Image (cartoon, rainbow, N blue to C red):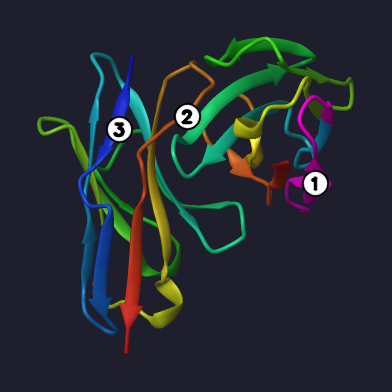
Amino acid sequence: AQSVTQLDSQVPVFEEAPVELRCNYSSSVSVYLFWYVQYPNQGLQLLLKYLSGSTLVKGINGFEAEFNKSQTSFHLRKPSVHISDTAEYFCAVTLINDYKLSFGAGTTVTVRA
Amino acid sequence: KAGVTQTPRYLIKTRGQQVTLSCSPISGHRSVSWYQQTPGQGLQFLFEYFSETQRNKGNFPGRFSGRQFSNSRSEMNVSTLELGDSALYLCASSFPPQETQYFGPGTRLLVL
């Protein structure tokens, strides 16, 4: 079975500074990888996904992630954060044709002025 | 396109009661999945339906059940509610071949 580890539970960051959220997964077979964001009292919004092809994936709101198969990682980055990026971020994995997502525990990003 | 909609958005029940939550997928999406989100356990997969058939089920007791209708709308039911069932229940839909799940705003259930 696949699993996801988000290495940081909380990440404080100043406005306009870069941020990196770390995600590692374990699976013996090929997977699809996702990052979702959850704002307070809302559902999950898809930021970006890796299905195949280029290992550098660009998403919405200036976020990007890099798939590293040898290190089984899928870290999320943004070069310059805004106050509005304050939210909880979830990394998720699914096996191909498995029809379910396995989520990490989440990383809370707090952006300060 | 309209997104995934869930009703009701908030619900308060007492122990022992049952509850039914509803989910309408994005138009054209035929797969619907349900997840439970709690502070202690995080996001956990409940079940997934496609063409009215359950294809995958998570590790939840039989009190949790679901179904999907011919128009792809889905309902989940929780019987004999326990305090620990208090959670945000999220529904997601996808267009086969399954790859990306799009989530609704969730139903927040409080069991007293």
Let me know if marks 2 and 1 both belong to one chain: no
In the drawing, does residue A21 fall left or right of residue B49? left
Return the chain for callout 3.
A
Q: Residue at x 52, y 41 (%)?
A: B38
Return the chain for callout 1.
B
Write the start and end of the magenta stretch as one range: B1-19
Q: What residue sits right under mark 1 in the picture?
A: B11
Q: What residue sits right under mark 3 in the picture?
A: A4
In the drawing, does residue A52 fall left or right of residue A44? left
Question: Which quarter of the figure is the C terminus of chain A placed in?
Answer: bottom left
Q: CA distance from mark 2 to mark 1?
A: 25 Å
Counting from the top left corner in percent of width and height, residue A102 is at 42, 29
What is the secondary structure assignment of the residue under circle 1? strand
Q: Which disc, if any, is residue B105?
A: none
Counting from the top left corner in percent of width and height, residue A42 is at 62, 58
Question: Which quarter of the figure is the N terminus of chain A placed in?
Answer: top left
Return the chain for callout 2.
A
Let me know if marks 1 and 3 both belong to one chain: no
Point out the residue furthest to the left here: A70
What is the secondary structure assignment of the residue under circle 3? strand
